[in-house]
Image (cartoon, rainbow, N blue to C red):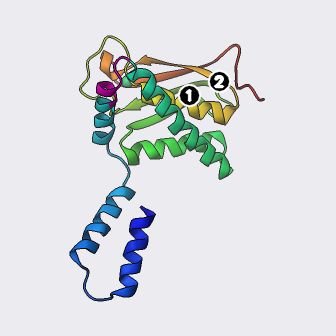
Amino acid sequence: MINVEESIERKKFTNTLEETALESDLRKSSQQVEEEPSSDTWRSLVDKIYSRFNGEGDSVLFDMGHRYGTDIAIEAKRQDMDSSKAFLTLVEKGLRSGLGNIEVDGDSIFGENLIVRVTDCPFCFGVSAVRPVCHFFRGVVSGMSEVLYGRSFNITEKNCTATGNGCCEYVLEEQSYSDYRLV
Ligand SMILES: [Zn+2]
């Protein structure tokens, strides 16, 4: 993306005449890259992963979500946000990036009795299943909470839109023997 922008800048510098067709294409593709993913993007990603990783899709999606959540929390810490504010950035990302409408309940400062609820979840939209299916987002909550609270949690998706509930609901329980307990 940087290369595309640099290329456009160079062209502007060397050629101040009208925008060429190539420059126009580069500018448009650069803008597309900068846009956040939509809910359609998440759904097609999930479809591709399940077709590529036979039987392993759940854990691949969990690991991807875990990394995504870890990155959000590390960036929040870098900006000196407390854990409550860090979760607000996830809520904002949810609205902006098609992850759904996210609500956080419980003590998000100390990580006690936390419950995360998502409506309009892109991962189970139009899906009917006997078990909850939103492994990417379960991973997001797991990765975020490990970094923010310095200890590991079991994240259970107790309710899922795919199983007929009104929202996806994730319950966080601290692991009795936490690999990550730092505090
Ligand atoms: Zn779900």
- Residue at horizontal 48 percent and vertical 23 percent from the top: 170
Q: Residues within 10 Å of mark 1 (few under 14, many from 20)?
A: many
Task: Name the amino acid, label 2.
Answer: Ser
Asked if 143 appears above or below 34 in the picture, the reply is above
Q: What is the C-alpha distance between the residues marked 1 and 2?
A: 8 Å
In what element is the residue under mark 1?
helix
Image location of residue 60, percent across then percent down = 44, 26
User: Which mark identifies residue 142?
Assistant: 1
Say which quarter of the image contains residue 35: bottom left
Which residue lies at the image location 41% right of the left edge and 21% below the top edge? 58
In percent of width and height, residue 19 lies at: 26, 80
Q: Which residues are magenta?
A: 49-55
The amino acid type, in three-letter code, at marker 1 is Ser
173 lies left or right of 119 = right
Q: Position of residue 133 (x, y in %)?
A: 37, 20
Instruction: Point out residue 105 in the picture as x, y percentages from the top left corner.
Output: 54, 29
Q: Is residue 114 left or right of residue 158?
A: right
